[in-house]
Amino acid sequence: MDKVLHSLKNAFFGLKYCFITQRNMVIHTLIGTAVFFLALLLRVSVSEKLFLLTAILLLLVAEAFNTAIEKTIDLYTKKRNSLAHIAKDVAAGAVLLTSVFAVIIVITVLGPPLWQLIKTILLF
């Protein structure tokens, strides 16, 4: 049990490190939280909330892996290295792909109820 607690402590430290040092992790979390609260206000279905939550968490996981890859490369070398540069770019690209996926999910899930709300407001 002691090893499990130690592993959990390390995992929480890793997340804390990401939130303290990685601006994009904080930005993604704030936007994701706002999107989820908007979903609650718009009363989207449970399955739609789960899609949103999945997209938000995938983005945070991608950002955490990106940080881990960057720090590992920084540990290995501080010199300009084309392979290190490629690895960092690919990791950043994975975050970008996940971001695009999240935006598509948000538009798909929240677009129709938001459009309906806008139409309702404009008609009054």
Image (cartoon, rainbow, N blue to C red):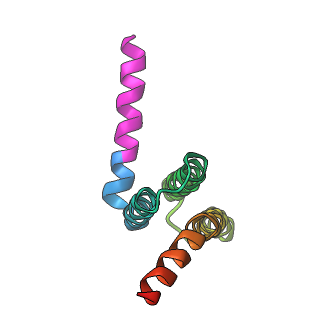
Quarter of the N terminus within the rendering: top left
User: Along the line of sight, which residue is nearer the eye, 91 or 36?
Assistant: 36
User: Along the line of sight, which residue is nearer the eye, 32 or 61?
Assistant: 32
Could you tell whether 93 is left or right of 57 in the image?
A: right
Please report the residue visible at 41 percent of the width from the left and 16 percent of the height from the top.
3
Looking at the rendering, the stretch of residues picked out in magenta corresponds to 1-15
Residue 94 coordinates in the image, percent (x, y): 65, 62
User: Along the line of sight, which residue is nearer the eye, 100 or 3?
Assistant: 100
Residue 30 coordinates in the image, percent (x, y): 37, 63
Name of the residue lying farthest toward the left:
20
Q: Is residue 5 magenta?
A: yes
Please report the residue visible at 49 percent of the width from the left and 59 percent of the height from the top.
74
Main SS of the magenta part reads: helix
Q: Is residue 74 magenta?
A: no
Quarter of the C terminus within the rendering: bottom left
Could you tell whether 77 is left or right of 16 in the image?
A: right
Residue 71 coordinates in the image, percent (x, y): 48, 55
User: Along the line of sight, which residue is nearer the eye, 11 or 68?
Assistant: 11
Q: Please say if 116 is above or below 63.
A: below
